[in-house]
Image (cartoon, grey):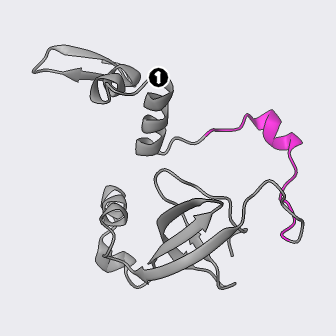
Amino acid sequence: MSINRWYDYALMQGGKLFDLAERLFPNLDASGVVEKINCLFLFERQNHPATILSQPIRQSVTEKQPNIPAIIIRDTKPLGNNPAINGYLAARAIPLEIAHPYCKEVYYRTGDNNYFAAGFENRSGGYEWKIRCHRPPHSVAD
C-alpha cells in the first residue's frame, strides 16, 4: 500500500483519501468533500520557494487591512464548557488539565458569523487561536 491510500480489510476495498471521504460523506459534492477533508486534517497550502521570496516579509500592524472584517470578542469562558473545543484539544492530544491554565474558550464574531476557539491571551490583551475549520485573520502574534 502506498502513501495517501486506505484499505478496509472487512470490505476488501480501498483507494485514495478522496475515495474514502466520498464514502464517509455521501451527501456532499466534490467541493464539500474537499472542504471536509481540509477541516478534519488542517491541510495548509505550502508556498513555492520562489513565491516566498517575492512576497513582502510582514505587513505592518499599523497599516489598514480593508479586506479583513473586524473580529469582535463576544465572550471568554474557562475551558471545558464547549464539547467541540474539548474534542479539538483531544484530537490534538492536549489534555484539558494542561491547556486549562493557559487557554480559554473564546467566542467571537467576524462580520455576520459567530465562531469559537480555544485561545490564549497575548501581551496586547488580544487572543491567539487556531481551530479546526476557521482560521480567522487576526493580529500578528506577540
Q: Residue at x 43, y 37 (%)?
A: 36
Q: Residue furthest front?
A: 112
Kindly identify which residue carries mark 1: 30
Q: Position of residue 31 (x, y in %)?
A: 51, 27
Q: Position of residue 111 (x, y in %)?
A: 66, 60
| Image-based side of 66 in relation to 28, left or right | right
Mark 1 neighbour density, 10 Å: few (under 14) some (14–19) many (20 or more): few
Q: Residue at x 58, y 55 (%)?
A: 135
Q: What is the magenta range?
A: 45-61
25 versus 61 height, above or below:
above
Q: Position of residue 115 (x, y in %)?
A: 51, 62
Secondary structure state at the residue bearing disc 1: helix
* Dominant secondary structure of the residues highlighted in magenta in the image: loop
95 versus 125 height, above or below:
above
The amino acid type, in three-letter code, at marker 1 is: Ala
Quarter of the image with the N terminus is top left
